[in-house]
Amino acid sequence: MEVPENFYGLVETTCRDLYIQSLKQIPDDVVDAIKRAAARETKEVAKRIFSHYLQSIDLGRQKDMMVCQDTGIPIYWVEIGGNLRLDGSRLTQAITRGTERATREHPLRSSIVSPLKRENRQTSTGDRIPIIHYDFVADSDVLEILFMPKGSGSENMSFMKMLVPADGINGIKKFVLEQVIGAGAKPCPPTIVGIGIGGSSDLCMTLAKKATTRPLGSPNPDPQIAALEQELFEAINKTGIGPQGLGGNTTALAVHIESAWTHITCNPVAVNLQCWRAERRRAKLWADGRVELSF
C-alpha cells in the first residue's frame, strides 16, 4: 500500500504532538501505580511525596503544563507495517522535523547539545538525535510510533556489565540490586527498573531502555523471566530507599525485563532506570489519514 504524499506531513505533526503531550500527560497506568503505592505506604514523608506527585500530575492535565522541567532526549520506536510502502529517509526527516517543531512552537527547552563543544541548536535535535529505532510488523497497514522523552536524572543512572555464563541468574540479580542501591535518590525514585539480558552489549542496553516503556506491571510473557521480574521487584522495594530517596516502602513502581539470545560465552546484563513520571506517548497512523493517540 503506497502512502499518499501528505502522509509524511501527518507523521511530522503527530511527532510534534507526541513530544508535547508526553511532557504534560502522565500515562494512566503510571498514575494508578502511584496511587497504589501511596495507599500502602507507611512512612509519613513518603506519603507527602506521593501526594505532591499526584498534584503535579493533575496540574499538568488541568492547566496544560509540563509536569517536569526536563524535556529529555527525544527517542522514538517506530514499527512499520509490512503492507505500507514508504520512503524511509523521508520518514526519518518527518520525525526529526516534528521534534524541531515541538521545540519551536510550544516552545520547549532544548536539552540537546554537542558532547564536546556543548553547543545547543535550540531544536532538541543534533547529530544522531532524535534517536529512532525501526522495526517491521508483517501483514500490517499501520505505522506505530512510541515516543519517550528520556530525562537526564534517570538516564545518567544507566549501567551495563558483561557477566560470564558462570555468574548465572544470581549474577544478574546481584548486579541489578547493586545498581539500584548505588543510584539512590538520583533517578527520582520510585523508578521503573528496565533490565536487558542477553544479546550484545549495545542490544542489551537497548532492551533495558525499551523495557521501561511497557505498561507498568505488565509481566514478560516468558514465565521464568516474569518470575525474575517479581523477585527483583520485591527485593528492590525492601531496600527502603523510597520516594526521592527519603525512605519508604516503594523504591520501584515496576521491574521490567526484556531479553535476547546471546553468545555461548556471554551473559550481558543492563539496567536503565526511568523516573516516576515514566513519560511516553504512542500513535498509530493509517495511510487514509487516521491517527489514534494513546499511552
Image: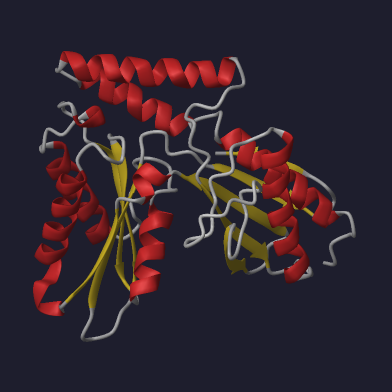
Q: Give the x, y percent position of residue 207.
A: 39, 62
Asked whether 206 or 220 is in front, the reply is 206
**Quarter of the rendering occupied by the C terminus:** top right
x then y, percent, for residue 155: 38, 50
Mark yes or no: residue 149 visible: yes
Q: Residue furthest right?
A: 5
How many marks are shown on the rendered structure?
0
Percent of width and height locating residue 128? 58, 65
Give the position of the N terminus as an image quadrant: bottom right
In this picture, residue 137 sits left or right of residue 141: left
Quadrant position of residue 208? bottom left
Task: State the residue lying farthest toward the bottom.
Answer: 264
Say above or below: 138 vs 250.
below
Is 161 drawn above or below residue 164 in the view shown? above
User: Which of these two is toward me, 89 or 121?
Assistant: 121
Q: What residue appears at the point 41 percent right and 46 percent down from the top-left corner? A: 152
In percent of the image, x 38 and y 21: which residue is there? 53
Quarter-of-image position of residue 218:
top left
Q: Is residue 140 left or right of residue 276?
A: right
Residue at the location (41% across, 32% down)? Answer: 30
Judge whether 193 appears above or below 88 on screen: above
Q: Is residue 292 at all visible to an observer of this figure?
A: no
Give me the residue at 52% from left, 16% from top.
Answer: 59
Q: Pinpoint residue 254: horizontal percent, then vertical percent.
A: 30, 41
Q: How is the image coloured?
A: secondary structure
In the shown orientation, is residue 233 left or right of residue 100? left
